[in-house]
């Protein structure tokens, strides 16, 4: 059954609401980044891009998803429940003692998670290793690596960028959530990244630059990335941090904090409105 | 006397004893491991020949990955390779790996429970003329503190070869610490090696003769401890020397057995006294059988340029200093 863009859009709103509920209950975590990246994950998991089977999370021929920015955990968890990896009841246990839903993802505790992550800047290296290993075994699987823009500060990231190019890892698609914020402020004030596209191009990558909230554009870019040969592909997805909730949008102070119950109510009210902050690209 | 059960080289205290860098033993072992198991892959950071990974590289070029001077990325890539079922062996100098990439090792290998074998070559003062910047003296501590990571410091080239082969079959990630300098090959093919087991190399003829002093040594210094033991024996002081190459897991059974027989333990390593092999012994014994321990190692200091032996002697880790330390302890007992 093929899901329509309209349904994907509705799903994205539900996921945002689930994240607000989860984070409010957890009382700590990251808010702005995950809220802004919902469409990227929705498109990958439900837009017919990713090869996966929640009944067989260790299936040899699955595509791999590496979450380099582990603080996007609430989004990843919500996505995985919709994908059928585990029951949505677990979402309310986020960050609680004994929960499978750790503050940052743990691959040993949860099906559907490829790497336990948290410290940023090293996921791309792991994705490169997976892409190399899959190539050695002549397996036709794609490796997707989600990164934040803040971790483009890390030297480790660029070491991995060079390696992917050296080994012509065309089975690797990196996605940068270009939301322009990191903990201490705007990325261009903390440590200027621009021009990011030219940087990646000069390192031998194919760069696709897209609107990170436009579902059809995202799906198109993912599919294109699979058919580009010899070069690894990076999708620079321009997103609005905190997308959907006006007092979180663009506010870097919301990188690492969560709404209190009053703020959560307001956030949910805004998200409930389909014609609110997330404008339908079909209308 | 030498422990005959360990089947050490008959040339052990002669001038004919062969001197080989443990790196060479590792290199041969890695190539053998590559033949035994196709899942073995190797990664190196621009020091391939120096770490002796060239044998493997030449034999299995499609399974060798040159990662450049980028140790943080190298271990992350190794973790990813392990996630696809490979057994990665990662080589560099200990000062860079685990010196430069500790958090990546912690997160992508240990916390992720991806089995990777790390080779830290050029560890210790024996690096010599390159000087303090290249002498890793903290690496045992860095690796010992990590869950899901074992630590081995082979005593000679043959043991290094056995260690890498054993590591391939071992369920855990392992850090193998190698010196740069050539050292006497005093073990033989028949000398037993097992991860988690240490060996009594030298022991008193009988209990009456035992001075009550047991040395736990690892790596490049084990041979010096043996030489000291032989000369002391000739002077009427009988000690025990244990090759504690398996720093983690520690051979708790053997450690406890010899602690019970001893009055004082000496630990000997080319590493900071803080957090090293001696600390591992002390942590175990202080909970199970507390007794005095003399720590021979670097005392919160860096090395410098010089020949290996000159440095070992200057920093108080050579045969002469071992003998002197033991004589001082013996004289305390005599009161």
Image (spheres, rainbow, N blue to C red):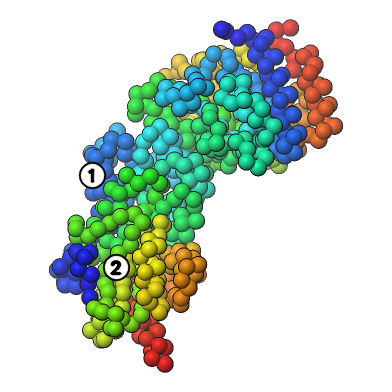
| x and y, in percent, of residue B205 in the image | 24, 78
Callout 1: chain:
B
Q: Is residue A120 above or below residue B99?
A: above
Q: Is residue B52 visible?
A: no
Q: What residue sits 62% from the left and 29% below the top? A: A77
Q: Which residue is mark 2?
A: B200
Element under label 1? helix
Left or right, residue A122 beside residue B230: right
Q: Nearer the viewer, residue A141 or B300?
A: A141
Q: Is residue A67 visible?
A: yes
Where is residue B178, by image quadrant? Answer: bottom left
Query: Could you tell me how far apart the alpha carbons at marks 2 and 1 are, in whole angstroms?
Result: 28 Å
| x and y, in percent, of residue A260 in the image | 81, 35
- Quarter containing the N terminus of chain B: bottom left
- Quarter containing the C terminus of chain B: bottom left
Q: Which residue is mark 1?
A: B32
């Amino acid at each position: 059954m093929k899901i329509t863009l309209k349904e994907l859009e509705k799903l994205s709103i539900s996921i945002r609401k689930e994240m607000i509920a989860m984070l409010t209950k957890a009382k700590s975590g990251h808010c702005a980044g995950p809220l802004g990246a919902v469409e990227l994950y929705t498109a990958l998991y439900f837009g017919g891009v990713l090869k996966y089977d929640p009944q067989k999370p260790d299936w040899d021929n699955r595509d791999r998803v590496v979450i380099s920015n582990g603080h996007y955990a609430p989004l990843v968890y919500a996505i995985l429940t919709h994908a059928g990896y585990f029951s949505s009841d677990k979402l309310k246990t986020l960050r609680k003692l004994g929960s499978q839903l750790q503050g940052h993802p743990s691959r040993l505790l949860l099906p559907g998670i490829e790497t336990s992550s948290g410290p940023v800047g090293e996921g791309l290296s792991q994705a490169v290793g997976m892409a190399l290993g899959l190539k050695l075994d002549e397996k036709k699987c794609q490796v997707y690596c989600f990164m934040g823009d803040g971790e483009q500060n890390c030297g480790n990231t660029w070491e991995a960028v060079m390696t992917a190019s050296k080994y012509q890892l065309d089975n690797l698609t990196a996605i940068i959530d270009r939301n322009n914020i990191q903990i201490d402020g705007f990325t261009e004030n903390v440590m200027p990244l621009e021009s990011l596209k030219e940087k990646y191009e000069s390192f031998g990558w194919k760069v696709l630059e897209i609107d990170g909230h436009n579902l059809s554009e995202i799906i198109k870019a993912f599919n294109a990335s699979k058919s580009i040969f010899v070069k690894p592909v990076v999708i620079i997805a321009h997103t609005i941090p905190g997308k959907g909730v006006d007092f979180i949008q663009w506010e870097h102070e919301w990188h690492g904090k969560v709404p209190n119950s009053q703020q959560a109510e307001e956030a949910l009210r805004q998200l409930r409105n389909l014609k609110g902050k997330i404008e339908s690209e079909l209308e | 006397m030498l422990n005959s059960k360990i089947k050490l080289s008959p040339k052990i205290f002669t001038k004919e004893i062969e001197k080989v860098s443990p790196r060479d033993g590792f290199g041969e072992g890695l190539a053998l491991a590559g033949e035994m198991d196709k899942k073995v892959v190797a990664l190196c950071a621009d020091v391939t020949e120096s770490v002796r990974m060239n044998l493997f590289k030449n034999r299995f070029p499609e399974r060798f990955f040159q990662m450049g001077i980028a140790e943080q990325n190298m271990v992350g890539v190794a973790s990813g390779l392990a996630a696809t079922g490979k057994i990665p062996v990662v080589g560099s100098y200990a000062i860079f790996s685990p010196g430069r990439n500790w958090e990546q090792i912690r997160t992508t290998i240990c916390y992720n429970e991806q089995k990777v074998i790390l080779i830290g070559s050029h560890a210790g003062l024996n690096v010599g003329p390159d000087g303090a910047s290249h002498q890793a003296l903290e690496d045992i501590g860095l690796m010992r503190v990590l869950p899901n990571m074992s630590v081995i410091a082979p005593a000679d080239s043959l043991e290094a070869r056995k260690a890498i082969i054993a590591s391939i079959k071992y369920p855990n990630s392992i850090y193998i610490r190698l010196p740069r300098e050539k050292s006497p090959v005093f073990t033989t093919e028949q000398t037993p090696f097992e991860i988690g087991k240490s060996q009594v190399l030298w022991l008193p003829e009988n209990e009456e003769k035992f001075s009550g002093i047991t040395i736990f040594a690892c790596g490049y210094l084990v041979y010096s401890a043996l030489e000291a033991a032989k000369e002391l024996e000739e002077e009427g002081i009988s000690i025990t020397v244990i090759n504690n190459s398996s720093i983690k897991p520690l051979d708790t059974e053997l450690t406890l057995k010899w602690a019970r027989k001893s009055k004082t333990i000496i630990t000997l390593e080319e590493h900071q006294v803080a957090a090293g092999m001696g600390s591992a012994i002390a942590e175990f014994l202080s909970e199970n059988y507390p007794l005095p321990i003399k720590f021979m190692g670097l005392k919160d200091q860096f090395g410098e340029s010089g020949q290996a032996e000159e440095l070992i002697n200057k920093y108080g880790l050579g045969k002469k200093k071992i003998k002197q330390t033991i004589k001082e302890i013996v004289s305390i007992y005599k009161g």
